[in-house]
Amino acid sequence: PGAECKDKASPQQVAEYTLKLLYSRIPPAVPGIMFLSGGQSEVEATENLNAMNQKPHPWHVSFSYARALQNTCLKTWGGRPENVQAAQEALLIRAKANSLAQLGKYTGEGESEEAKKGMFVKGYTY
């Protein structure tokens, strides 16, 4: 379902339907499939990627996130030199979380409240 749907799908449901679609349209010879976050929160994007990688499939399923990788980092930094170290730590946390998710081993431990906030913006363009 879309971001405005009242009935939120679980990561397991997202994985089930996404993989079903991929199996019906993408040949196993395709080496990899990268997902964008599409306005999901950092945590939602990571949980959905993780759920897909907990099921067998012939592709390398990974991420090509922008906002879902950088949001907390950029908000933590805020353009202030004194926040650089904290921002780097926030980026490292996101990178590690998504690294684990592409292996199906993400646990969600230690996630910040900021990382759980949705980033959907109606009509957003890159």
Image (spheres, grey):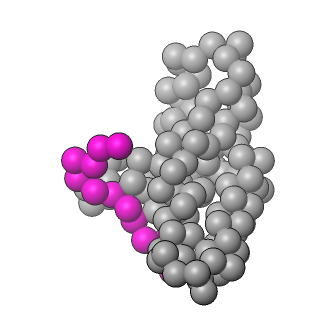
Q: Residue at x 63, y 13 (%)?
A: 27
Q: Is residue 34 above or below residue 109?
A: above
Residue 72 sits above or below residue 103 on the image: below
Does residue 55 appear anywhere in the picture?
yes
The answer to whether residue 13 is seen in the rendering is: no
Residue at 35%, 43% in the rendered image:
126
Q: Quadrant of residue 120?
A: bottom left
Residue pushed farthest front?
81
Judge left or right: residue 92 versus residue 72: right
Residue at image point 61% right, 43% down: 63
Image location of residue 39, percent across then percent down: 39, 54
Residue 37 on image: x %, y %: 48, 49
- Is residue 27 part of the magenta span, yes or no? no
Q: Position of residue 105 (x, y in %)?
A: 77, 56
| Residue span colored magenta | 106-126
Q: Chief secondary structure of the magenta span?
A: loop
